[in-house]
Image (cartoon, grey):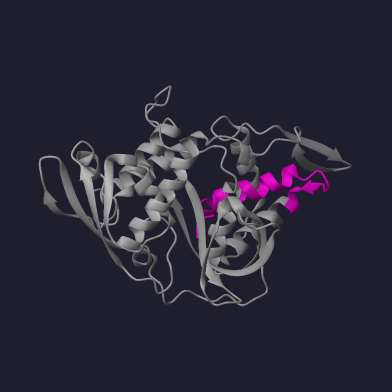
């Protein structure tokens, strides 16, 4: 396999060496670090040579790379390498020109999938990447995506994603909103899902052998567990969420039929953005539209219904109607 296939792995291995002020990294150490990183990544003994390391350093120091502030410090007849700025790391830099070109090529490949089932996300992703990294030369952003830069827990995403990909069980320290103190859980991570601008981790609870989900912003820390990983061979997560709004799926809960009256004024919005995939029209009049949904009832559904305030009315089932009535009375008491 060509050495340049592992360029990104080598760059990050060198970055770790240059950032390590506790150790003197000579050229032999840099070669060893790169070979170990490549072996750890793909089990391949790449055999990186001195010339390749020098070429990598030249690239990393260039404007096309990251313009790294590298020192070459003499130690007798030898030389070791480190950053002159202790706080510098290529991880904290924007993408370089070469990475931008690679990203453009990747996006060109992805455009081939536009319009195909299951690939609807590609067009939005392409616009997001082009706008964020100015791949078309724009000076300023032209698209505003929903995001929450203050959301906690996003730093966990890469580690959790890697645990899923590498099939590693995790020891998670977690504190839910209603917990007075953190708890420890061994989880077999299977799936990451975003909802309402928050990320959730789904997996098998090792103790209870049930599906559990954790909000990433409530995870305090996690580490690899020595428990043997239990692979997901039973759940198709695309189907798992078909009968709900959001991320709360109740085990063995019945699918209920909801009838909802929608005011004519708000109907065009709900028609273009259905409350749920099962939504269908049962009847239309001059003032309202009656729609039917078939789904589980959960907290996220209630929140969605209340977001429309007085623009709709739940007709059935009566049990959910009573729950909404109870919540509405509580709200009324706070304002009147």
Image point (43%, 72%), residue name: 251
Q: Is residue 296 rendered magenta in the image?
A: no
The image quarter in which residue 279 lies = bottom left
Q: Is residue 3 rendered magenta in the image?
A: yes
Residue 141 seen by the camera: yes
Q: Residue 136, relative to residue 298: is it above or below?
A: above
Q: Horizontal placement of 19 versus 96: left or right?
A: right
Residue 162's spot in the image, x, y percent? Answer: 55, 60
Residue 131's spot in the image, x, y percent? Answer: 40, 32
Question: Please, which residue is most extreme toward the right here?
Answer: 76
Image point (35%, 37%), residue name: 127
Q: Residue 124, relative to residue 211: is it above or below?
A: above
Q: Residue 100, relative to residue 243: is it above or below?
A: above
Q: Horizontal placement of 228 versus 72: left or right?
A: left
What is the count of numbered marks?
0
Image point (12%, 52%), residue name: 283
Q: Nearer the viewer, residue 84 or 213?
A: 213
Residue 56's spot in the image, x, y percent? Answer: 61, 43
Q: Horizontal placement of 310 versus 227: left or right?
A: left
Q: Horizontal placement of 288 versus 303: left or right?
A: left
Q: Decide whether the magenta segment is chiefly helix, strand or loop.
A: helix
Q: Nearer the viewer, residue 336 or 77?
A: 336
Residue 20's spot in the image, x, y percent? Answer: 77, 45
Image point (50%, 56%), residue name: 200
Residue 244 seen by the camera: no
Q: Which residues are magenta?
A: 1-29
């Amino acid at each position: 396999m060509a050495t340049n296939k592992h360029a990104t792995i080598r760059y990050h291995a060198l970055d770790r060496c240059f950032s390590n002020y506790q150790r003197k990294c000579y050229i032999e150490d840099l070669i060893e670090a790169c070979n170990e990183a490549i072996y750890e990544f793909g089990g391949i003994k790449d055999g990186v040579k001195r010339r390749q390391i020098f070429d990598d350093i030249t690239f990393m120091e260039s404007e096309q790379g990251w313009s790294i502030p590298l020192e070459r410090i003499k130690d007798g007849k030898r030389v070791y390498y480190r950053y002159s700025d202790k706080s510098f790391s290529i991880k904290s830099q924007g993408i370089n020109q070469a990475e931008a070109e690679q990203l453009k090529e990747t996006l060109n490949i992805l455009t081939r999938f536009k319009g195909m089932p299951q690939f609807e996300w590609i067009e939005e992703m392409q616009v997001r990447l082009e706008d964020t990294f100015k791949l078309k030369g724009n000076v300023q952003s032209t698209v505003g995506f929903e995001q929450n830069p203050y959301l906690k827990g996003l730093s966990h995403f890469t580690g959790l994603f890697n645990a899923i990909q590498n099939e590693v069980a995790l020891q998670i320290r977690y504190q839910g909103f209603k917990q007075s103190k953190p708890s420890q859980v061994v989880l077999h991570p299977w799936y990451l899902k975003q909802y309402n601008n928050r990320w959730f981790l789904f997996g098998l609870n090792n103790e209870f052998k049930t599906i559990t989900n954790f909000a990433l912003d409530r995870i305090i820390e996690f580490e690899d567990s020595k428990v043997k990983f239990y692979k997901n061979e039973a759940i198709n997560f695309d189907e798992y969420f078909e009968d709900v709004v959001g991320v709360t799926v109740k085990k063995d809960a019945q699918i209920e039929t909801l009838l909802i009256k929608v005011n004519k004024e708000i109907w065009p919005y709900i028609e273009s953005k259905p409350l749920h995939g099962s939504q269908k029209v049962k009847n239309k009049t001059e003032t309202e539209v009656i729609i039917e949904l078939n789904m589980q009832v959960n907290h996220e559904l209630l929140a969605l219904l209340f977001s429309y305030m007085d623009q709709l009315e739940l007709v059935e089932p009566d049990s959910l109607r009573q729950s909404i009535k109870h919540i509405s009375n509580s709200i009324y008491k706070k304002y009147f």
